[in-house]
Image (cartoon, grey):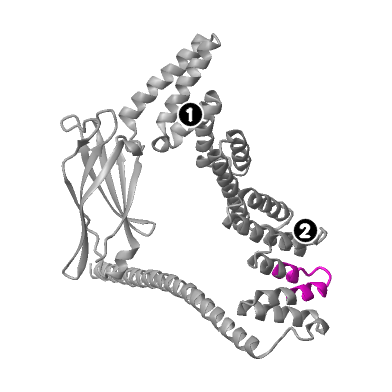
Amino acid sequence: MIKEKKIKNRVNKKKEFIKEIIGYTRTAFISFLVGAVFTILLSFHARSEMIKNLYENKSAAHNLERQVALEIVSHTDLTASLNDKNYAICMQVGRIYEAAGELEKADYAYHLAQLKSPIGVYTAFYKQAVVLIELGKINQAEELIESVPDVNSVNLIKFKTRAYMVLGDKYFSESKFLKSADSYEKSEYYYSRLKKQDKYVQKSIIKRLVNAYVEAAAVIVKNGYNSDAVRFLKQALKYEPDNYLIKYRLAIIYADLDPIESIKYFEPLLQSHPQEIDYRVYNRALMKAANIEELKGDLTKAKYYRYKNHSLDLFLNNKVVYKDDVEIFIENFEVKKRFFRYRIKMQFIIKNTSPSDIVKLNAEYVLKQQDKQKESIIVNIADRKNMLFSNGGESDSFTINFGKNIYTKKELVNYSIDVYLYKDPKYKTLIGTYKIPIK
């Protein structure tokens, strides 16, 4: 009996020991986990501060470089006997004059440097091209870039990629969109020849190219040349086949040129961006298409387009809020400090400006800190008991009180409020973005 008790005590002591070990292990693991998380957060903060300091230091270094350059050129003419100096000295003199803002002398120094450039080195060509562009001598810059013969060289490809991009930016800033697009096309052509490519650089070139074609099309449409606008938009669509804006502009232009083609662009947009479509144009295209098919004798297709027009009206009435159908009136928008915290309040009325009664409507107010959503408040605006009647029907006055705690007035600058209206939560329409009023 005594022996059994001893064995039992030993077993219990062993169990207690194991429990203690497990407890210590758990405590150590939790401590390690908390320490690891804290270390990671500190590293993110340190990285953020490092990037911030890097930009600040870069700006300070640039200002210092400019001051030093101004001091040097105010006492010395560095271009004297520069023709006898080597490539490296000419480049350095060019950089000094460029930093000092004396671009004509920088152009001269870079010109001498490119005449003395080692084979396969194109830095001086690029620097001179940039200076010529800044001087407004765009034709000379373009001639300089084109004068450099194409060879199978990574340095040449990088030079022409960058140079044509800068040239395109200059043309774009002067609203010469077709010339801008041509330069970006050349930049994209050379960059595509690189074996190792950076996807961000590629995207940057494509974005510039697409924007140039889209802007060129917009100018041409204003002048009445819709066919040419279509050509440029389709060129842009080759580079960004999923670009909603391009397809939408093609749908709008085709509504007059070719209603049936317009419908081909409108139909997929109805599924992806229904709240951003001008349904008046879409309706017009459908009716024109129906009339065209009727004149051609195809009554089945004519009936099909009229049916789609009717279906579109039902879809709009039940699912979608179009931007022009409603107006928001802000009655009060204030920020008050209470107990060391700033609180945001909005008071508003919704007005129905459409020709149809709105039977169902909700509003979502999203408080954002820059691009991050911090709080969302949803309010029912209209239902069958409280409809918004057509052509001027107004809702009751609603007050939104955001609960987000904001502790400094300076921080308020980073906040804004997006207002969405919707009949169906799948199809929310952004009606407006409002900055926080700071007094």
**Residue at horizontal 49%, vertical 15%?**
291
Residue 369 - label: none
271 relative to 407, above or below: above
For residue 121, above or below residue 219 = below
Q: Which three-letter amino acid code belongs to the residue tagged 2?
A: Glu
Q: Secondary structure at mark 2?
A: helix
Q: Position of residue 217 (x, y in %)?
A: 57, 42
- Quadrant containing the C terminus is bottom left
Is any atom of residue 158 visible in this view?
A: no
Q: Secondary structure at mark 1?
A: helix
Q: Are the residues tagged 1 and 2 within 8 Å (C-beta)? A: no
Q: Which label belongs to residue 267?
A: 1
Label 2: how many residues lie within 10 Å, few (<14), some (14-19) or many (20+)?
few
The kind of residue tagged 1 is Glu
The residue tagged 2 is 146
Q: Residue 282: horizontal and vertical position, in percent? A: 44, 28
Neighbours of disc 1 within 10 Å: few (<14), some (14-19), many (20+)? few
Give me the C-alpha separation between circle 1 and circle 2: 45 Å
As drawn, 321 above or below 331: above
**Stretch in magenta:** 110-127
Let me know if residue 403 appears in the view: yes
Horizontal and vertical percent for residue 417? Answer: 30, 54
